[in-house]
Image (spheres, helix red, strand yellow):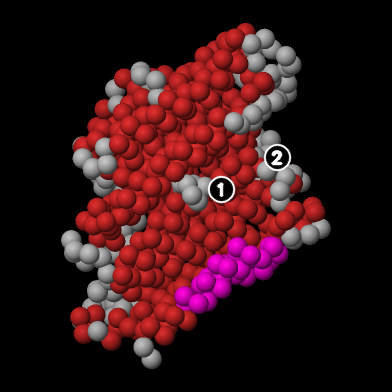
């Protein structure tokens, strides 16, 4: 398939993620939207890796454009680390106010 | 190399030490010892140019005098931070050893973010900085403000990480030679390809988030206000200059050739940051929140280095890192010990603790940029860099005007300390000890010495 299709798909997913972060009020759903953003990037990186691998200049390289696919693993690992910390923070908040609604978070404003 | 590996190892040692050591006083000494060891090992690397570890990093890490000097500054500032505030870290909660461990991990992340040569290590370095900080922000578990700050910081941080990754993906797609190495992007002097341009804007947005430059600064006051004050001190100084260093290195090495194509964006961000930081700081009653806005304002000055991007700017960012970190850490160390965080809380400090009040005055004068202090030299180098750059001269005038505005809110505290009568108790439970005052005095002298001989920092760059 054309690279434009992949770019369009992953930008769509990314935009859904951004809109979700900005619009939704439930901390867990915001969190899921952030994960959606990261996974859109994963898709795009793999697609670009395939795109580069088809070009003759890259074929001569020892890495053969596979470094983007390795990058994806790093993103997955970091995302997992972020999940563990993030869910702990959300649980900590739930214990204190018995809600995960971010609208509760306005004590610091005044 | 030494700093990256040793601080990661020491973080693990501290973490495991927390399991076995039940005495609450031991972690402090363990942490200070570890940091001294790392600092000495790093100085050895800076002087002899040889690391204790010989690891083939495949050019993914680039070590030169510039970033070695910067890491040395970061380690020295952290050492002073430990000496001044370690006893306050003990008071945050029961897991003392873990707090120190997380700080060591952050130091590892900063060293990585200062030496990266590929976008992969930039991403990993920034994440190693951020993730421990989410935990430190929320470390006061029963306090709702701390919870709120942690959640806000976490959501904003993860969001900006997503944006940064999108930028990296687009830059990878845009380079013809399929590489993440920042000096290998093959950008010609002509117009940038569309994908590189999109990637650059995404990276600019996400790094502005991380260093809290306007218009992406809105999380900063809330997070800095809600976090335990000791950790605010760490976050707003050492971590912030670390982020800035990564920002400048990335844009210099990867996009330096096409500087004039994105310079206008930086002008806009700089002016907005200076405006919002300084103007909002004037209206704050809480000193902690005022310092949060002042850190945004100082970020505006540091952005001038990104605007100019020449040799003077490199010297300037080193000086600024040292001057800003030392002064803010010192001032925060005094603030942590106080009962009342409003400006009225400082009333009559000069009568009760003349030494502490004098040191605080020097710190505030340095933040304002009064001559003979390090703050003056750093601001001077930044402005000189912007002048030498030759374009958009008016930005220098704007920056000087905003520096004058900043004098108002810093001097308000000096006025409260010297010219007002104490209304209530200033230090209740933790009075400044003799050791604390000694370190405070040393920090003060360091600021004055850097203000007179800035060469003692800059000189390391040209060895």
**Residue found farthest to the front:** B394
Residue B200, image x and y in percent? 35, 61
Residue at the image position 59 percent from the left and 31 percent from the top: B283
- Distance in Å between CA atoms under marks 2 and 1: 14 Å
Q: Is residue A76 left or right of residue B245?
A: right
Residue A20, image x and y in percent? 61, 68
Q: Chain of mark 1?
A: B
The answer to whether B129 is drawn above or below residue B355 in the figure is below
Depth check, front residue: B76 or B47 = B76
Residue B327, image x and y in percent? 47, 28
Judged from the image, the secondary structure of the residue bearing numbered disc 2 is: loop
Q: Which residues are magenta?
A: A10-37
Residue at the image position 57 percent from the left and 64 percent from the top: A81
The answer to whether residue B5 of the structure is visible from this angle is no
Q: Magenta stretch: residue B366 in it?
A: no
Q: Chain of mark 2?
A: A
Mark drawn on residue B218 = 1
Write down the quadrant of residue B230 in the picture.
top right
């Amino acid at each position: 398939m054309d690279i434009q299709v992949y770019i369009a798909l992953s930008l769509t997913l990314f935009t859904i993620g951004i809109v979700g972060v900005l619009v939704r009020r439930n901390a867990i759903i915001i969190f899921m939207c952030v994960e959606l953003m990261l996974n859109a990037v994963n898709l795009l990186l793999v697609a670009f890796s395939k795109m580069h691998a088809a070009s003759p200049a890259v074929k001569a390289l020892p890495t053969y454009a596979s470094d983007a696919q390795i990058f994806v693993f790093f993103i997955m690992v970091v995302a997992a680390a972020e999940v563990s910390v993030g869910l702990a923070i959300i649980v900590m908040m739930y214990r204190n106010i018995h809600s995960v609604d971010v609208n509760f978070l306005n004590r610091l404003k005044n | 190399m030494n700093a990256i590996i040793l601080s990661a190892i020491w973080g693990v040692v501290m973490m495991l030490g927390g399991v076995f050591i039940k005495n609450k006083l031991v972690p402090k000494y363990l942490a200070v010892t570890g940091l001294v060891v790392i600092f000495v090992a790093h100085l050895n690397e800076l002087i002899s140019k040889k690391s204790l570890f010989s690891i083939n990093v495949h050019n993914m890490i680039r070590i030169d005098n510039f970033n070695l000097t910067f890491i040395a500054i970061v380690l020295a500032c952290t050492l002073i931070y430990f000496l001044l505030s370690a006893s306050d870290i003990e008071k945050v909660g029961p897991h003392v050893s873990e707090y120190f461990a997380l700080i060591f991990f952050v130091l590892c992340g900063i060293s990585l973010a200062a030496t990266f040569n590929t976008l992969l290590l930039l991403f990993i370095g920034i994440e190693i900085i951020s993730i421990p900080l989410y935990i430190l922000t929320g470390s006061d578990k029963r306090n709702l403000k701390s919870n709120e700050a942690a959640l806000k910081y976490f959501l904003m941080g993860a969001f900006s990480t997503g944006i940064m990754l999108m930028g990296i993906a687009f830059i990878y797609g845009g380079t013809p030679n399929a590489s993440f190495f920042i000096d290998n992007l093959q950008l010609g002097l002509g117009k940038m390809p569309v994908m590189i341009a999109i990637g650059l804007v995404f990276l600019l947005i996400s790094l502005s988030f991380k260093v809290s430059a306007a218009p992406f600064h809105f999380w900063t006051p809330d997070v800095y206000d809600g976090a335990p004050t000791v950790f605010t001190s760490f976050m707003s100084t050492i971590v912030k200059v670390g982020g800035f260093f990564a920002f400048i290195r990335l844009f210099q090495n990867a996009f330096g050739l096409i500087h004039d194509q994105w310079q206008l964006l930086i002008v806009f961000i700089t002016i907005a940051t200076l405006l919002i930081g300084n103007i909002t700081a004037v209206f704050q009653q809480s000193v902690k929140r005022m310092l949060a806005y002042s850190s945004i304002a100082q970020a505006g000055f540091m952005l001038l280095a990104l605007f100019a991007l020449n040799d003077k700017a490199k010297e300037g960012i080193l000086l600024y890192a040292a001057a800003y970190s030392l002064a803010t850490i010192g001032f925060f160390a005094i603030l942590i010990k106080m009962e009342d965080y409003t400006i009225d809380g400082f009333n009559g400090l000069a009568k009760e603790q003349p030494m502490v009040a004098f040191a605080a005055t020097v710190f505030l004068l340095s933040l304002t940029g009064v001559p003979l202090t390090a703050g003056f030299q750093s601001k001077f180098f930044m402005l000189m860099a912007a002048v030498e750059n030759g374009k958009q001269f008016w930005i220098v005038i704007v920056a000087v005007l905003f520096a004058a505005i900043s004098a108002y809110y810093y001097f308000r505290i000096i006025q409260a300390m010297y010219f007002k009568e104490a209304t209530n108790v200033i230090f209740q439970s933790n009075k400044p000890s003799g050791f604390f005052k000694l370190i405070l005095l040393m920090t003060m002298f360091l600021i004055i010495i850097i203000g007179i001989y800035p060469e003692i920092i800059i000189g390391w760059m040209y060895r």
